Image (cartoon, rainbow, N blue to C red):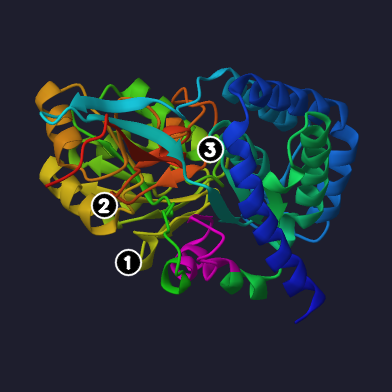
Amino acid sequence: MSDQQHYLEQGLAKAREASRELAGCDDAKIRLVLEALADRTMAEEANILQANLSDLSRMPETDPKYDRLLLNSERLADIAHDLRCVAALPSPVGEVLEQRGLENGLELSKVRVPMGVIAVIFESRPNVTFDVFALCLKTLNACVLKGSSDAHDTNRVVVGITHEILAEHGINPAVVFLAPPQRQYLASILQATETIDLAIPRGSRGLIDFVRDNARIPVIETGAGIVHTYVDASADLAMAKSIITNAKVRRPSVCNALDTLILHRDLLPELPGLMQIMGEEYKVEVFADSESFHALEGDYAGNLQPASEAHFGTEFLSMKMSVKTVVGLPEALDHIHRYSSKHSEAIVAENAETIETFLNHVDAAAVYANTSTAFTDGGQFGMGAEIGISTQKLHARGPMALPELTSYKWVVRGSGQVRS
C-alpha cells in the first residue's frame, strides 16, 4: 500500500469517528466556529490568494475553468459573508418532522439527523471547500473533500486554516478531511461503504458520470447546466434584453449561465437589438440557426457562426451561446425537452397563460418567469450557501443546503409494550 493510499484510508476512518463526536456538539459552538472561520479567511487573505495564484499559474486563462478557479478579494469577502449566513441559520438537526401516538400507547416521532460522513468530489472551485465544510458542520456531518489537482494548493491552505479554527474551539479537526487530489484515489472513496454515507459530485459531465458509474455508496448528482431562455412573442423587449444579457455574461463559467436563447419567430427583427450588448461589449460568440443567422448577419458585433446540431445541448461555460428560432411555445417546450439537463429554464413573456403553461410543463430543478437563471444558487435562495444543484428527483432537487444534508430516524417511546 502506498503512503498516499494509507493516508487516504486513515483520513476516512478518522472522519467516521469524528462524525460520531459531533453528535454532542451544540449549535452555539458551531456558530462560533463558522464566524471565526469567516474572520480568519479575511485575515489570511494574502496567504489564500498566494496559494490560489500558484494554482492559477498552471492553467491557461483561456480555459473555461480559469474563472471558476480564480479567487480575489471580492470573492473572499463573499465567501466570508456566506459563512456568516450559514452560521446564523437554524440547524435542521433535531427537527421533528412528524409526531403521532398509536392506539397501543406508543409515541412516534420522525426526527432529522445528520447523514454522517459526506464526500464531495469537485474540480476547479475552491469556494466549494468553504461551502461544503460550513454546511456539513452546521448539520453535524463530517466531510471528505476530493478536489482536483487544479485547486489543490488553495484547498490545502483553506483546510489548514479550518483545522486550526476547529482545534481552537475543541472540535476534532478530522471532521474535515482533504483527500489526495490525484484521480487514482477517487475509486477508493467511491468504494468506501464502511466510512462514507453519501457522495456528491460537482463538476463536468465526465466526472459526474464516473462517480455514478463507479460508486458503491449512495450518490446525489449535481448535473451539468444546459440552460435555455425562451423569449415569447408577448415579451417586454427591454426586459428580455436585460435578462438574457445577465444570464449569459454575468459569470459565463457557472452552471446557471445561459447556453441557448430560444426566440419566437415573430421577434426575429428585434434579435439584433436583443443581442446588442452581448455583441458590442462582451463579444459573445453566437451559433445561430438559419433564421436567426440571417436576422443577425451584418448586424452583430461579435463572432457569428451557423449553428450545427452539436451547438444545441452544449454547456458552453464561456462567452459562447446558441440561438434557436421557434414558431411558438409548443416548439420551444419540445426543444427544451430534447436538450435540457433539467437544471434551470426560463421564459420571458407577458401573456399569463403562456407563462403558466411553461412553468407547469418544463421539467427542471428550477423554472423561471421574467427573471434571470443566474439566481439558481443556494445563497440567492436564502440557504446561506449550497452543496450543489441537484438535477435528480430522489431526496433532493435544485440548490441543496442544510435540510438536504440530513436524513431522519423514527424515535419510539413506550411504557413496556410488547407485540403479540
As helix, strand or loop, the secondary structure at mark 1 comes to helix
Tag shown at residue 291? 2
Q: Is residue 148 above or below residue 235?
A: below
The one nearer the camera, 406 or 22, is 22
Write down the region rendered in magenta.
189-211
Q: Quadrant location of residue 170?
A: top right
Q: Crowding near pointer 2: few (<14 within 10 Å), some, many (20+)? A: some
Q: Is residue 287 above or below residue 164?
A: below
Disc 1 marks which residue? 309
Whole-angstrom CA distance, mark 2 to mark 1, is 15 Å
Whole-angstrom CA distance, mark 3 to mark 2, is 24 Å
As helix, strand or loop, the secondary structure at mark 2 comes to helix
Q: Position of residue 84 (x, y in %)?
A: 65, 21
Q: Is residue 112 left or right of residue 116?
A: left
The one nearer the camera, 353 or 173, is 173
Disc 3 marks which residue? 249
